[in-house]
Image (tube, rainbow, N blue to C red):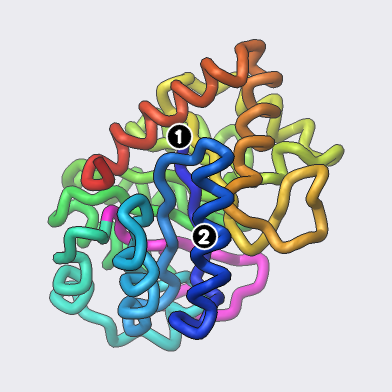
């Protein structure tokens, strides 16, 4: 499974809470966790979490919300931050036209920079895509034509068309707790139709806790319920889904072995 958690705890003041969260994930059967970077220049914070635990890894990148704030990040800087044994991915980066927190041109430039880093390092790119399906797909297709790179559409809530265009490029699609919501039927339909070898599940913690914890702070142990609903949507057993998503995780995040 992929379990991703955004870094919102002030390490090390919350060390005991981090220990408890990871312990609950292990008890639930979660084998690897990836804590996601949202600002390149705060990479030390997510690395500190990853370095605390053998089974926790991290990514480095600039979230599209912060693309304006980190518009001067260079490829060399991003590559340097990625050159660490605990860094297993680039991102999250992408486009968010729902909030438009950063100028769209800055988001696009940052997105392409992160693609270049993913291509050069061989690490997968974790992509944030919200209300920007056509532009995300167009950039992925343009950049893939320049040279292959691996990627995952993280916390997928977009259209089936974007999912299929991503899969056609060799990308993965990752589903969060939204899959378990009553309103999540369209996502369950998409998840049921995609190639099995391209599926992942995640938390997007501390957000989007699956039912029956909806409205509470999300944490990695809850991803088991998302996987169960994904299994139900595809007509397989939870054990089969756990094996499938685990295999997919290690194929995509190969540095996390």
User: Which is more foreground, mark 1 or mark 2?
Assistant: 2
Instruction: Depth check: give the residue in front, 249 or 104.
Output: 249
| Residue 214 seen by the camera | yes
Residue 5: numbered disc:
2
Q: Residue drawn at (78%, 60%), measured in percent from left and top? A: 216
Q: Percent position (x, y) of residue 125?
A: 33, 53
Instruction: Depth check: give the residue in front, 71 or 152.
Output: 152
Q: Percent position (x, y) of residue 61?
A: 35, 69
Q: Secondary structure at mark 1?
A: helix
Is residue 102 covered in magenta?
yes
Q: Percent position (x, y) of residue 40?
A: 33, 77
User: In the figure, is residue 87 to the left or right of 139?
Assistant: left
Q: Percent position (x, y) of residue 253?
A: 30, 43
Q: Residues within 10 Å of mark 2 (few under 14, many from 20)?
A: many
Q: Residue drawn at (48%, 75%), measured in percent from left and top? A: 15
The magenta region covers: 88-106
User: In the figure, is residue 254 to the left or right of 234?
Assistant: left
Q: Residue drawn at (66%, 72%), measured in percent from left and top? A: 99
Residue 165: numbered disc:
1
Q: Residues within 10 Å of mark 1 (few under 14, many from 20)?
A: some
* First-in-chain label (1 vs 2): 2
Assign the C terminus to one quadrant of the image.
Answer: top left
């Amino acid at each position: 499974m992929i379990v991703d958690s955004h870094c919102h705890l002030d390490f090390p003041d919350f060390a005991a809470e981090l220990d408890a969260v990871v312990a609950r994930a292990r008890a639930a059967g979660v084998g690897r966790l990836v804590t996601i970077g949202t600002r390149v220049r705060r990479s030390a914070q997510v690395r500190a979490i990853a370095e605390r635990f053998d089974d926790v890894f991290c990514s480095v990148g600039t979230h599209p919300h912060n693309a304006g704030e980190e518009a001067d990040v260079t490829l060399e800087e991003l590559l340097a931050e990625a050159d660490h044994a605990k860094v297993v991915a680039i991102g999250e980066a992408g486009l968010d036209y729902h909030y438009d927190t950063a100028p769209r041109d800055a988001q696009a430039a940052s997105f392409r920079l992160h693609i270049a880093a993913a291509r050069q390092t061989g690490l997968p790119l974790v992509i944030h895509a919200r209300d920007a399906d056509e532009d995300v797909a167009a950039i992925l297709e343009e950049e893939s034509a320049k040279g292959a790179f691996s990627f995952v559409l993280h916390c997928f809530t977009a259209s089936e068309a974007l999912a299929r265009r991503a899969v056609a490029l060799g990308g993965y699609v990752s589903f969060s707790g939204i899959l378990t919501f009553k309103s999540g039927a369209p996502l369950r339909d998409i998840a049921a139709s995609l190639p099995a070898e391209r599926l992942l599940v995640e938390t997007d913690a501390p957000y989007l806790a699956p039912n029956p914890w909806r409205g509470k702070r999300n944490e990695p142990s809850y991803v088991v319920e998302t996987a169960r609903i994904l299994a139900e949507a595809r007509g397989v057993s939870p054990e089969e889904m756990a094996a499938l998503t685990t295999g997919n995780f290690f194929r995509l995040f190969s540095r996390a072995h």
